[in-house]
Image (cartoon, rainbow, N blue to C red):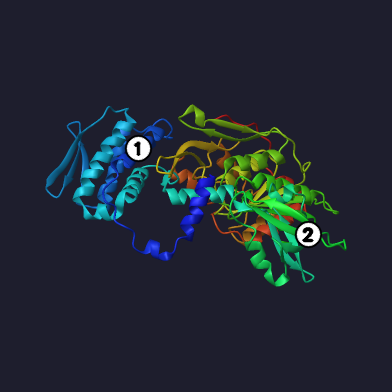
Amino acid sequence: MNRRALTLLLIIALPLSVWAKPAMAAGFDTQSAASVWGAALSYIAPRALEALSIPQMTLWGLNGLTALDPDLKAQLQDNQIRLYGPEQLLIAVPAPAAEDAQGWGNAAAAVANAAFAASPALQQAGTPGIIESFFDELFNHFDPYSRYEPPLQAAQDQLLITGIAGTGLTFGRQDNKVVITAVAAASPAAEAGLTVGTILLALNGHPAYPSQVASLNGQLNGILGSQVILRIVDPAADASGTDITLTRALVPAQTVFNESGSADIPGALILKIAGFNKGTSEQFSAALEAGLGAPQPPNALILDLRGNRGGVLRQAVLIADSLLDHGKIANAVGRDPDADQDFTAEGTDLTAGLPMVILVDGQTASAAEILAAALADDGRAVVVGSATLGKGLVQTVTALPDGGELYVTWSRVLAPRGWPLQTLGVLPQVCTSLGAADLRLQLEALMRGANRLEAALLASRAARAPLPVDKILSIRNHCPASIGGDLDFKAAQALLASNTAYHAALLPASPAISP
């Protein structure tokens, strides 16, 4: 990871002229393509959600040659992989044994090499472009989430998940001083005991001025393992300050934010979770602990998952576990036995049962949907908003010999009551996407102890994979997907103001249903 991070920093630092005219490859790198494709086929074959033969996957991938040059066509004939150009056979390679993944990778590379020699379009694409086109065409036959990421993109994505090298500090301006305004959980700054409000006098030996806040924040990031020296002083102290040395480490981006002041809902702790990276559960625990420990503790919790596209599944599971004292969180079921996972709450509800509302919208996806579904199915929270995206497939990831990464869908996620998240999404218990007038009717019914969406909610929880499209639409149309807005907070406020409405919106208790 360290090498990849440094490589990325070096690549980004290259001048534009380096990118302007890439050098033409001297020839096709047959060995590299063979190793990448062979490793990929070997990895996919036993793990893909649907059983696929290695020969078929190879031929799909070789369609990538045609995508780059329509005059080329690879076919399996008479137990040979034959590559045709305009009115001529360019090469015929004996077909390996059906289960020989590396053999098919070698054969595909040999065919691609012949195509490269005959096609200016392939020569322009170069070896990396041909490798990528192979995967593009292969994954056209898979679900939308299985994919290949080239080395640079893989390094960038990895940095988004694990974080960049920094200290975990954020500086701001207050009373004409530079002060610490945020400390990331599990960061070097947090481990050193630094706290919000502490005054910064100097950074790396240079005085810190309020007009330089942006520059000071920029100086906190750097090479992994390097150090930054801060001279700080407690705001209540009258002293020359103390020097603190922090060693830069990988700090996951902040994904949890306290937005309790963003809506006029008295007594509610509002936590926005923007995504799930390797630090999200720790950030959530820190924000929740701070909120619960405030001088006036909250009387309700609102989780805002709108626009959250997901991320690291394990982080969503950990957050669900911290809000449930029992119950199933999710099941993951696949063709490979290693893909099967059963997530169950094993801890305690850190909020001690505070009323909870979860805000979702049409952009809430993946791990965020799993979290919302778990808390709703277990009767722990009321979900408010619109139907979510419906991304309920889990990918397994492996590194390839070229430094790229392969994402292969290998399991389907089932909510605690046994229904599939994929394509169906989470149907909220209170719908805001139908407008203010419809929301008013829903809230009036809830005040009387009835939920107008009860039949649709029961249908969604009774659904089982695979689902026909008309069934999916008939359920989702009860609360069409939309972008979240002010009505979400208005609905949450009304629910939290009435015990009758809140409890009428909760799903009735039901035992978890095994897949």
- What is the secondary structure assignment of the residue under circle 1? helix
**Residue 55 location in percent, x, y?**
29, 34
Residue 274 located left or right of residue 119: right
**Residue 338 location in percent, x, y?**
51, 29
Mark 1 or 2: in front is 2
Residue 324 located left or right of residue 69: right
Residue 478 located left or right of residue 88: right
Q: Residues within 10 Å of mark 2 (few under 14, many from 20)?
A: many
Return the mark for residue 35. Answer: 1
Q: Amino acid at mark 2?
A: Ile
Considering every residue shown, the one lying at the far front of the view is 205
Label whose residue precedes the other's in the sequence (1 or 2)? 1
Q: Which residue is mark 2?
A: 232
Nearer to the camera, 44 or 505: 44
Q: Is residue 343 visible?
A: yes
**Residue 230 location in percent, x, y?**
73, 58
Q: Using the image, determine if residue 7 lies above or below residue 100.
A: below
Residue at coordinates 56% horizontally, 41% vertically from top-left? Answer: 459
Nearer to the camera, 491 or 233: 233
Nearer to the camera, 384 or 161: 161
Quarter of the image holding residue 195? bottom right
Nearer to the camera, 316 or 117: 117
Which quadrant of the figure contains the C terminus?
top right
Q: Is residue 499 visible?
A: no
Q: Amino acid at mark 1?
A: Ser
Residue at coordinates 86% horizontally, 62% vertically from top-left? Answer: 239
Residue at coordinates 67% horizontally, 38% vertically from top-left? Answer: 378
Q: Using the image, determine if residue 383 lies above or below residue 440.
A: above
Quarter of the image holding residue 324? top right
